[in-house]
Image: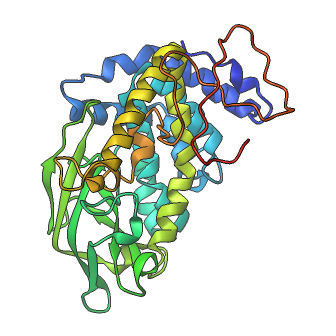
Amino acid sequence: MPPLAHLAWPFFGEEHRRFGARLADWANKEVGRHIDHADVDQSCRSLVRALGDAGWLKAVVPAAYGGLSEKLDVRTICAAREILSWHDSLADFAFAMQGLGTASISLFGSDEIKAKYLPPVCSGRHIAAFALSEPEAGSDVSALATAAAKDGPAHVRIDGLKTWISNGGIADHYVVFARTGEAPGAKGLSCFIVDADMPGLEVAGRIEVIAPHPLATLRFTDCRVPLANRLGGAGEGFKVAMATLDIFRSTVAAAARPMCAATPVSTAAGAMGAAAGAMTGAMAGPVAGAVSRRPMVNRRPADIPVDMHVPIHVNVPVDIDGPVVPAVPAGAAAPADPAIPRKAAPVPAGAPPG
């Protein structure tokens, strides 16, 4: 069972403690029977159905549509992701994607759209996905090239490519971001719900990764979508995307906590050091080489908050022989913990003291 003592901290309420205890008990009994890492598609379908049947997906839907709270409660989502990740990352993935793939609907959808899409997601009968990243636009959302052109007064036609899309190939709907041209850059994007069976949408390829989960590239070719499926106003796609990601950013740390708690500090520091070195080297290497800057940095998925479990900060020096302790400014008291060997992190040349 995962440790839950931290749920007694004052920024959690009694409802979070009850939720955490019940979910931990359920997950201990149920998660394992739904997972087969050799068949992640079926595992995710089974997990989503089980999470819905047990009521845990109520945490990712507002109360008006069958959920727990009037608005999405980040603390509840954090508790759920931590507990599920403690048992299996695929269980966390299945839960988190139901939220990420519908938060835009909860925040910006019309009453009709919410009534259509949120209840089946809450019950686990409908699988959700968030389609933002593209081959040439990952972290730089303003560079999206997928386009949605007007097609009469009530439709748009979407053309383009999305990649690194979690739940790609098994989702029932995709929240898709496309350029509609109201203004240059980020101010010219809009957001649409595209049902998986709409003509013109196809799965162009599946993507294999180290931690297996459903991941795909999607191709849109003259895909006709009702204007009623737009979330937010014309040109508000960037706002929709950022508001959605803001809810789930902090939950990544919650999902990572079980991994960090189970990993010796020296091992974690070594792994982060190696990763930081690899990333720094790739960014500094020649663009003409086999690995360019763009694939390493800008072609990663925009849904990284649900795909990565250990955040890497490449600008932080890491001592692989032991935990790093930042240098203490003159006159400041060093933190007292005699159990941890102290090694000051090097200060980059030219950096100001402190």
Q: Quadrant of residue 203 in the image?
A: bottom left
**Res 215 seen here:** yes
Can you give x and y, in whole percent of width and height, for residue 349 in the image?
57, 44
**What colour scheme governs how the chains and residues are painted in the rendered image of this protein?**
rainbow
Q: Is residue 126 visible?
A: no
Taking depth in this image into account, of 84 and 285 the one nearest to the observer is 285
Q: Is residue 232 above or below residue 270?
A: below
Q: Which residue is drawn at 35% across and 60% down?
A: 132
Residue lying farthest to the top in this orientation: 339
Rendered residue at 67%/26% (across/down): 18
**Residue 243 or 41: which is nearer the viewer?**
243
- Apparent side of residue 61 relative to residue 289 in the rendered image (left or right): right
Q: Determine the residue located farthest toward the front in the rendered image.
A: 350
- 311 vs 289: above or below: above
Q: In this view, does 73 lie to the left or right of 285?
A: right
x, y (%) of residue 230? 40, 74
Q: Is residue 305 above or below residue 240?
A: above
Q: Position of residue 84 (x, y in %)?
A: 47, 26
Residue at the image position 20 percent from the left and 54 percent from the top: 217
Quarter of the picture containing the C terminus is top right
- Give how far across and how far down residue 222 sits, in percent: 15, 76
Q: Nearer the viewer, residue 237 or 284?
A: 284
Q: Which residue is drawn at 30% across and 23% down?
A: 35
Of 19 and 289, the residue lying toward us: 289
> Which quadrant would the N terminus be assigned to in this image?
top right
Left or right placement of residue 206 versus residue 95 in this view: left
Q: How many labels were placed on the picture?
A: 0
Residue 42: quadrant of the picture: top left
